[in-house]
Amino acid sequence: IGMIEYFDECFSSGDSFNIGEQRFSVDQTRVVQPDVGSVGSTGCIRTDTGVYISYPKEKLEELPVDTSDSYDGVDRPAWEPEFGEGEFMGRVVENLDRKVGELCSSHLPKPSEGEHSLFDEHTMSKVYTVSVPVTTGYEYTFLVSKWEFEYTVRSEVHRKWLQTLLETGMGETNSLGFGFVNIIEGDSL
């Protein structure tokens, strides 16, 4: 049994509980199992929290823009619109390659090995910074972006890649809440 199913079994409508001094009440519970759909399905995935894409300093030197003054004293620079959307998508695919390699069966090819792009269309809606406490007394400011991605499920392998993205999040530091994605429209809804 997974963690979500466990919590669903533990709580019912009307239950109350405390986390520290904070009191919470349960209105309702339900287990949601989003799915990108079967082969041939179309849909749109939206990032409901910003996507964080870091850049190692040595990779910055490969970019077609001058970043020499941008990141003095910063350990992990992030993707910026000046780097180009192609650069963003390339880093998203690299990150998904790692997740597919870690979480899926070893015979599943990685997204970077695919013949086609992951999405049919993509649109960035905004770029912003958010400060997150990473330890007591210390906050880190992340540069993140929000997107919408239209897709057509082209094969069973492509479906597994999209489903992995939906279940794990897009980009990096998903454990801090970045890169949360939802299906906002599609045949599978």
Image (spheres, grey):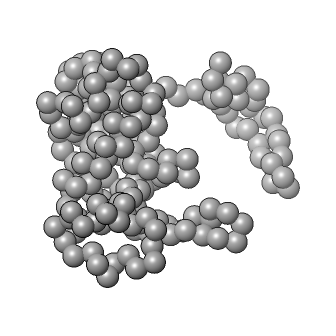
Which of the pair 75/155 is nearer the observer?
75
Q: Looking at this rendering, what residue extends furthest in the bottom direction?
A: 69
- Number of marks in the image? 0
Where residue 54 appears, as percent x and y from the top left, is 39, 58
Which of the pair 30/164 is nearer the observer?
164
The correct choice, above or below, for 92 with respect to 152 in the image is: below
Query: Residue drawn at (40%, 19%), measured in percent from left and top?
Result: 105
In the rendered image, which quarter is residue 42 located in? Answer: top left
The correct choice, above or below, for 22 with respect to 12 in the image is: below
Where residue 110 appears, as percent x and y from the top left, is 29, 30
In the rendered image, which quarter is residue 4 located in? Answer: top right
Query: Residue drawn at (29%, 60%), measured in percent from left and top?
Result: 59
Where residue 66 appears, as percent x and y from the top left, is 21, 76
Q: Quadrant of the C terminus?
A: top left
Q: Quadrant of the N terminus?
A: top right
Q: Is residue 142 left or right of residue 118?
A: right
Where residue 170 appears, as percent x and y from the top left, is 39, 45
Q: Is residue 166 visible?
A: no
Q: Is residue 146 visible?
A: yes
The correct choice, above or below, for 106 with respect to 170 in the image is: above
Q: Looking at this rendering, what residue extends furthest in the front direction?
A: 58
The correct choice, above or below, for 24 with respect to 69 in the image is: above
In the rendered image, which quarter is residue 166 located in? Answer: top left
Query: Residue drawn at (44%, 42%), measured in percent from left and top?
Result: 169
